[in-house]
Structure formats: C-alpha cells, structure tokens
Image (cartoon, rainbow, N blue to C red):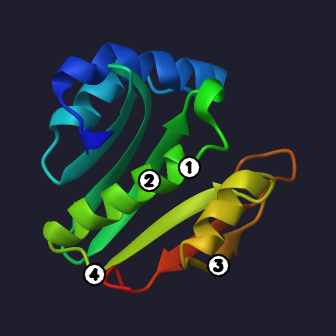
Amino acid sequence: MIRLASPDDADAIVAIEQESFGTDAWSPALVDIELIAPGRVVVAAEQDDVLVGYASAAVVADVADLTRIAVTPAVRRAGTARALLGSLLKHAADRGAERMMLEVADTNAAALGLYVQSGFVEVARRRDYYGNGVDAVVMELASLGD
C-alpha cells in the first residue's frame, strides 16, 4: 500500500535511509524537516504494516524536485519504487507541479532504468558531482499529466 507519509513515519524512514545510503543518509533532523516542511510531498510504501520504502519531492510553483526514493533491500526489484514514484507524481501534480526534475548518479543503473521507463529524459550532466568521476544525470519529466 502506498500512502502519504506522516511525522509518525520518521523513525522508519531514518532506518531505511541508513540501510540504503549509509554515510550519505539523511540525519533524523533532516527527515523530520522533510516530513513537515511546506511544499514537501512524502509518500510511503507499507507491506504487512511495516514501512518498506518512501519517496519525497519539493514542489515549488510548477516544478517538483524529486529528492529521494529509497526501498528496503528485501522488496527491491518488486515494483515498489515504481509505485512510489507514480504516487509521488500524482501528489505533486495535485499540488500544482507540471513537471518533475531529478539528479541521479550515472552509476545507478537501476534508478536510471526506472526513470527512463517512467518517461524522464536526460537534460544535463554535472561532471564529477558525486566525486570519484561519478557524474550527476539531470533528468526531467516534462509533463506530469503524461
């Protein structure tokens, strides 16, 4: 089940952050801010009453910036990230976003595949953005209605 996240989900999101991103995980304080800040949309995926993933975006005027998608390893490759992205797109559109932007490491083949299959196109690259020769691929979904 995909639903809007709430501040009650903070501890579970922090755990998913740590499991997914290690030293690059958001701190508990950043997760708290993401869940309550104006203009933020956060959706959560549950299985058997356990949070197994989440996605977040910042909506400013007509643009939504995807900030995170994370899914626990146990449910990866099962469509959870795709479902989270779909729900996030809908909620962002409901808040006035007409397009979505994101950045992803050029080494993250799974995420790149998800975004391309979802209609995102590469619009720019930021060379060595993540260090060690890893570029950021800037992608856009030009119409959330498609």
Q: Residues within 10 Å of mark 2 (few under 14, many from 20)?
A: some
Please report contact status of discs 1 and 3: CB closer than 8 Å, yes or no: no
- Identify residue type, mark 3: Ala
The mark closer to the camera, 3 or 2, is: 2
Structural distance between the alpha carbons of marks 3 and 2: 26 Å
Res. 92 in view: yes
Looking at the image, tell me whether mark 1 or mark 3 is earlier in sequence order: 1
The mark closer to the camera, 1 or 3, is: 1
Which residue is disc 4 drawn over?
A: 98
Which residue is disc 3 drawn over?
A: 124
- Identify residue type, mark 4: Glu
Please report contact status of discs 1 and 2: CB closer than 8 Å, yes or no: yes
45 lies above or below 68: above
49 to the left or right of 103: left
Task: Locate residue 63, reporting x and y percent.
Answer: 30, 73
- Identify residue type, mark 2: Ala
Structural distance between the alpha carbons of marks 1 and 3: 27 Å
SS at circle 1: loop
Structural distance between the alpha carbons of marks 4 and 2: 19 Å
Which residue shows up at 41% across the image and 50% down it?
A: 84
The mark closer to the camera, 4 or 3, is: 4
Q: Residues within 10 Å of mark 1 (few under 14, many from 20)?
A: few
Q: Residues within 10 Å of mark 3 (few under 14, many from 20)?
A: few
Which residue is disc 2 drawn over?
A: 83
